[in-house]
Image (cartoon, helix red, strand yellow):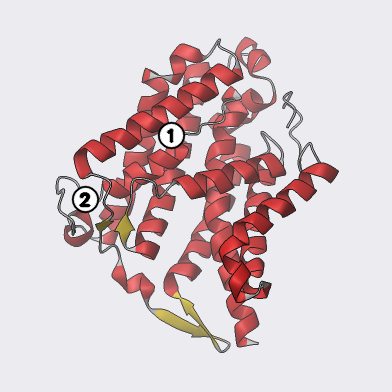
């Protein structure tokens, strides 16, 4: 019972991480039809924001001197600010361009952020001490679960409910949903494009900050490539869930986390190093039988 519960919590925790990242990508795609491949580098930037202004191999700056109730909003604000800045400086110039051009621009922006971090901190991973109390295990029905896993799951559930309420019950949320359905028609009906797009980028950046806090606490390190794997899985989750579908992205994120966790358990020890290959194989099977995604958005025109 304890081992089964451990697997369930591992799957939910990993799925929560992928779901938050996929949600950040789906928000931008919903209003701009842009797959923002710089999202992973925004995550890494938020982690390195914990080190500023130190560039030492071991750095505990914000994490050591700020209480958690100030640290968490600060990192979320850094992610939101960087995402809004990227929209103002880069993506606003490409609104009339085709999706492929905007995607290439997002790749370029990601490399700019990555090499900026490389210039400041080098490629060597940095050690950080971020909310160390969260690494303490707690016992639930015989399973020893790290407190961080439980918090990650609860935070993800809270974010999903909060975002759902925001999109359904606020004027800004209704404008964002209208823009996701038909951006041209929404503008004709009075929806302010700049406001909606900047709001989507701010929410996406805040989600990147939340992921940065989780990754920083889990790994205890800051690495300029640490957001790449999460970004890849999030993009796959967005495709499987249905491009433009927020609910589909979340469901697919949890599905990917569950598949990866189960593969880690059932595969022979010698094959566990190739776990991701089996996960991607499962993704191919899903897309063969459901190429439009699990929950294809009504406003999405692009083919997978």
Q: Is residue 9 above or below residue 289?
A: below
Q: Which residue is mark 1?
A: 202
Foreground pick, 174 / 61: 61
Q: What quarter of the picture does the C terminus occupy?
A: top right
Q: Residues within 10 Å of mark 2 (few under 14, many from 20)?
A: many
Q: What quarter of the picture does the N terminus occupy?
A: bottom right
Task: Return the disc, 2 or 1, that comes first in the chain's sequence.
Answer: 2
- Tell whether 88 sits left or right of 256: left
Q: Which residue is mark 2?
A: 51
Q: Is residue 264 above or below residue 54?
A: below
Residue 37, position as x, y percentages in the image: 50, 34
Foreground pick, 53 / 103: 103
Residue drawn at the location 19% of the way across and 61% of the way down: 64
- Tell whether 89 sits left or right of 6: left
Res 102 seen here: yes
Residue drawn at the location 27% of the way across and 39% of the way down: 117
Alpha-carbon distance for marks 2 and 1? 22 Å
Res 198 seen here: no
Which secondary structure lies at badge 1?
Answer: helix
Residue 286, position as x, y percentages in the image: 78, 48
Foreground pick, 17 / 304: 304
Q: Which numbered circle lies on residue 77?
A: none
Residue drawn at the location 63% of the way across and 30% of the way down: 177
Residue, far front: 270
User: Residue 232 lies in what quarter of the image?
Assistant: top right
Which secondary structure lies at badge 2?
Answer: loop
Q: Is residue 206 above or below residue 35?
A: below
């Amino acid at each position: 019972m304890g081992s089964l519960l451990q697997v369930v919590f591992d799957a939910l925790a990993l799925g929560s991480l992928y779901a938050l990242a996929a949600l950040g990508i789906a928000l931008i795609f919903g209003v701009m039809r842009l797959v923002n491949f710089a999202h992973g580098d925004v995550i890494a930037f938020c982690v390195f924001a914990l080190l500023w202004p130190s560039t030492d191999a071991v750095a505990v700056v914000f994490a050591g001197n700020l209480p958690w109730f100030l640290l968490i909003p600060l990192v979320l604000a850094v992610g939101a600010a960087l995402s809004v800045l990227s929209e103002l400086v880069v993506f606003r110039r490409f609104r009339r361009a085709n999706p492929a051009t905007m995607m290439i621009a997002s790749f370029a922006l990601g490399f700019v952020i990555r090499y900026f971090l490389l210039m400041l901190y080098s490629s060597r991973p940095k050690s950080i001490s971020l909310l160390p109390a969260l690494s303490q295990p707690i016992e639930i029905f015989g399973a020893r679960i790290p407190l961080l896993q439980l918090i990650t799951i609860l935070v993800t559930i809270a974010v999903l409910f909060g975002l759902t309420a925001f999109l359904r019950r606020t004027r800004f949320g209704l404008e964002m949903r209208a823009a996701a359905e038909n951006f041209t028609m929404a503008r004709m009906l009075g929806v302010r494009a700049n406001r909606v797009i900047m709001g989507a980028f701010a929410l996406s950046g805040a989600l990147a900050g939340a992921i940065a806090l989780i990754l920083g606490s889990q790994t205890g390190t800051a690495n300029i490539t640490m957001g790449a794997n999460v970004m890849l899985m999030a993009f796959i989750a967005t495709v499987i869930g249905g491009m433009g579908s927020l609910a589909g992205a979340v469901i697919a994120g949890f599905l990917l986390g569950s598949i990866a966790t189960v593969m880690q358990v059932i595969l022979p020890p010698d094959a566990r190093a190739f776990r991701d290959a089996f996960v991607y194989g499962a993704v191919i099977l899903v897309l063969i039988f459901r190429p439009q995604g699990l929950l294809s958005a009504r406003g999405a025109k692009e083919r997978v």
